[in-house]
Amino acid sequence: RSRLAQTYLGAGRFASAAATFEDAVALGDQTASTALGMALAYIAMNRNAEAGTLLEQWRHVIPHGDLGLAMALSGQPEQAIAVLGTAISQGDNTPTMRQNLAYAYALSGHLREARMIASQDVPADKLDARVSEWALAASLGSSQLRVATLLGAPVRTDPGRAVQLAHVVPSSKPRPLYPLRLCRSYRLPLVRHLADRRRLVPHLRLPDTRFR
């Protein structure tokens, strides 16, 4: 189910992704990648409170770069800045982490700080365009558009899941979501230009299959 949910997520079908991630958890999936994918689907559907609760529950398991970026997208840029800044100060000082931190600053409205951090890795002739794109992302009112842009997914209306999938749920009471084991997680760096037609998140582990 988690693979199917990830495919829905990559196709921009966020309602189907959220429901299928929930099914995966009910069936026993306890991986951090499923929790993060579910949080992203919730954010795209404006279910930020649920996403925030999920991210807080998994904050010690989801990689800091992914956690901080998801927090920023869920409307918690200040918390994201704290998570990413602490990780960087403790040695995880990579271009991906710095760019995610810069993006979190941009979403919080601190464009001067975003520009200063981004300048460590973005060429000078591309810096203005990068910061302008981030400022535009910060001004977007649509969470769906913001998440879709991040994932390189289309913005579309979700027709819902097939009936035979939507009604297959376990008969027993779903288990609570606790971090029992960690599998390979999403990677959500914001290193490349938002206007790039290629996938914005080159390290995001989504399946190659696509829904037609």
Image: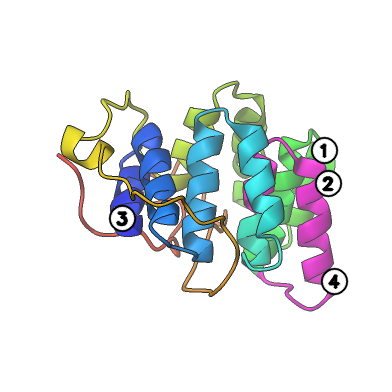
Give me the C-alpha separation between circle 1 and circle 4.
20 Å
When asked about the image quadrant of residue 66, the answer is bottom right
Image vertical order of residue 182 relative to residue 164, above or below: below
Q: In which quarter of the image is the C terminus?
A: top left
| 202 left or right of 51 in image | left
Q: Give the range drawn in magenta.
A: 69-94
Query: Residue 48 location, x and y as percent?
Result: 63, 34
Task: Determine which residue is flagged by label 2.
Answer: 113
Assess whether mark 2 and mark 3 are in contact (beta carbons under 8 angstroms).
Answer: no
The residue closer to the viewer here, 100 or 59, is 59
Give me the C-alpha separation between circle 4 and circle 3.
37 Å
- Pick whichever of labels 4 and 3 is earlier in the sequence: 3
What's the residue at 83%, 46% (across, down)? 113
Disc 1 vs disc 4: which is toward the camera? 4
Judged from this view, the residue extending furthest toward the bottom is 91
Task: Determine which residue is flagged by label 1.
Answer: 110
Disc 2 vs disc 4: which is toward the camera? 4
Question: Where residue 1 is drawn, which disc sits there?
Answer: 3
Assess whether mark 4 and mark 2 are in contact (beta carbons under 8 angstroms).
Answer: no
Task: Determine which residue is flagged by label 4.
Answer: 89
Give me the C-alpha separation between circle 1 and circle 3.
39 Å
Would you call the spot at circle 1 few (<14 residues within 10 Å), some (14-19), or many (20 or more)? some
- Pick whichever of labels 1 and 3 is earlier in the sequence: 3
- Pick whichever of labels 3 and 2 is earlier in the sequence: 3
The overriding secondary structure of the stretch rendered in magenta is helix
